[in-house]
Amino acid sequence: MQAVIDLKRGLNGREMNREAANALAMRLAFQDGYIDALACCYHAGLGVKKDSETALMYARRGMELGLTYSPYVVGLILSGGDSKSMLPYAKLSADRGNPIAQEAVAMCYDDLGNPALEFEYARMAATQGSPAGIRMLAHCYDPSITTTIAVEDGTRIKSDKKAVELYTKAARLGDSEAQYDLGICYKFGAVGLQKHVLKAVEWLRLAAAENDEDAINHLANIHEQID
């Protein structure tokens, strides 16, 4: 990947026009299987100057080649954040095994009011060890969240025990939103947990360390109550 980045900057100080650099980078990317990575780098500005046009070029080619991340990048660029527009691209990437896209599809189906498919794609991401996917799966099992469902053996279920298990797993893997959720559960005694201020503070502090404003506010509220 560094070779591709160096090439785009001008290998060994040689100046290259954009067309020549793109052509050589494309050939190198094909050889090393880096089309997906190039698309992501140019979309996010990682190691290279952010360039949506170039990112889209690589992502479209990667999509044609059946690569995993490329459809997701195409969707990010073209959808403008609209869930309905993003869905077909994210779903293509998700069905190719991309856990980030699986998370995105779950969120799209949440926005579009399809809890059954939200659960399906959250479970896909969770199965691959995605902390965000595990947290989304916890939301599906959480009885306090009425807009989601979990399905096991064809039966819709809600489970405090399963929700806590998944929140805790995602939180321990470093997902700040799960840390916040778990902190709130301990603060108010939700999903079958007993109120426990120390545990609430423990998890909310971790979320606050990631600049979660809600966690920061709840911590301040707890400290006010103690004082």
Image (tube, rainbow, N blue to C red):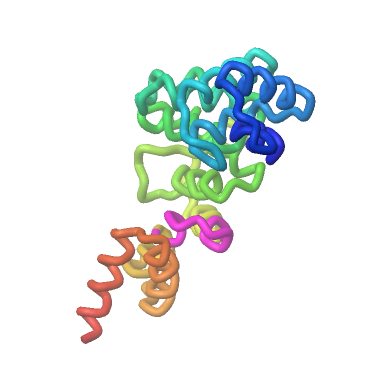
- First to last magenta residue range: 169-180
Residue 161 seen from this side = no
Residue at x 49%, y 18% (from the top left corner): 88
* Image location of residue 51, percent across then percent down: 47, 28
Camera-side residue of 157 and 199: 199
Q: Up-down: is 49 above or below 204?
A: above
Residue 146 seen from this side = yes
Residue 205 located within the stretch drawn in magenta: no
Q: Up-down: is 49 above or below 169?
A: above
Camera-side residue of 156 and 216: 216
Q: How many numbered circles are shown? A: 0
Q: Quadrant of the N terminus?
A: top right
* Image location of residue 181, percent across then percent down: 40, 58
Q: Quadrant of the C terminus?
A: bottom left
Residue 175 located within the stretch drawn in magenta: yes
Camera-side residue of 222 and 196: 222
Camera-side residue of 65 and 90: 65
* Image location of residue 129, percent across then percent down: 64, 47
The answer to whether 27 appears left or right of 211 in the picture is right
Q: Tell me the quarter of the picture where residue 195 sits.
A: bottom left
Q: Tell me the quarter of the picture where residue 201 sits.
A: bottom left
* Image location of residue 63, percent across then percent down: 62, 17
Residue, far bottom? 227
The answer to whether 135 appears left or right of 219 in the picture is right
The answer to whether 206 appears left or right of 24 in the picture is left
Residue at x 68%, y 41% (from the top left corner): 2
Residue at x 36%, y 30% (from the top left corner): 111
Predominant SS along the magenta part: helix
Residue, far right? 31
